[in-house]
Amino acid sequence: MHLWRAAIVALALALLISVPAAAADGRYRACLDPGHGGTDPGAVRGTLVEKELNLDIALRVRALLGSTAYNVTLTRSDNNTTLGNSARAQICNASNAQLVLSIHLNASTDATVDYAWFFYGKPQKDKAFAATMDANYKILNASGTDLLAHKVITNFANGTLLKSNAPAALAEGLFMSNTDERTLLAATDASSRRQQIAEQLVAGIKAFAGR
């Protein structure tokens, strides 16, 4: 148990080495948590693997936020790292994050289902942030004819959300199992579906952070 805790602390410190001390500047501190990773691939549909998509989207969010106004920490920066929810929260807490966003994509056995869904852990701490993310996520549906539908924000007893000190939310940006979304998600260019998801998540983060 002590070795396990020491490994988590060492990982958190390693991830934070390149991040300036929280009090060193006035940038807003955001912690992005790409869901799954390592031995946990998340949903898999053909060549699409959720852990890889989540990280790609998180990296795009970080790039869009930039380093001038935001100090961004990622809970993982590769697809080989396996992290439990408590470890993810500990990394975010060690960075003194002011918000925590866990990035996921949804999946279903029904390939026609597609909608966005945001979750919060502790209502008093997290619900306002989840609501802000939901309200500012205005991505078009896969056919580009209308806004993608949303499910009502929901409480989720997820350890990353519950154990993070900062307001925390989990985003299920869309269904990677949807037939049309699978085609769109295969692209990686600057106008790709992945980029669109990142842009919408950034809109929510900026609205909540006020910058």
Image (tube, helix red, strand yellow):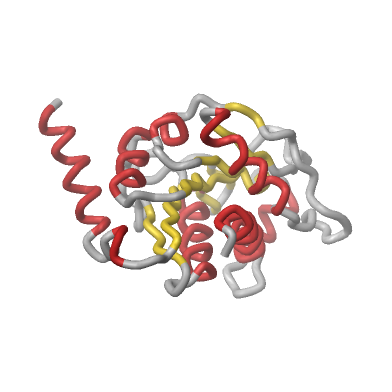
In the rendered structure, the answer to whether residue 111 lies left or right of residue 38 reads right
Vertical position of residue 60 compared to residue 74: above or below: below
Let me know if residue 65 appears in the view: yes
Residue 186 in view, yes or no: no
Of residues 139 and 81, which is closer to you in this image? 139
Identify which residue is drawn at 61% across, 66% down: 195
Percent of width and height locating residue 79: 37, 53
**Which residue reaches farthest right?**
145
The vertical placement of 103 against 87, above or below, is below
Quadrant in which the C terminus is drawn: bottom right
Left or right? Give the position of 3 relative to 92: left
**Residue 109 appears left or right of 211:** right
In the image, 65 versus 103, the foreground residue is 65
| Residue drawn at 47 percent across, 70 percent down | 69
Residue 138 image point, x, y percent: 75, 55
Left or right side of 165 for 169: right
- Residue at x-position 54% and y-position 41%: 169
- Residue at 52% over, 48% down: 103
Query: In which quadrant of the rendered image does the N terminus lie?
Result: top left
Q: How many marks?
A: 0
Residue at the far left in the pictured view = 3
Q: Where residue 140 sits in the image (x, y, percent)? A: 78, 57
- Image position, residue 72 (x, y; %): 41, 61
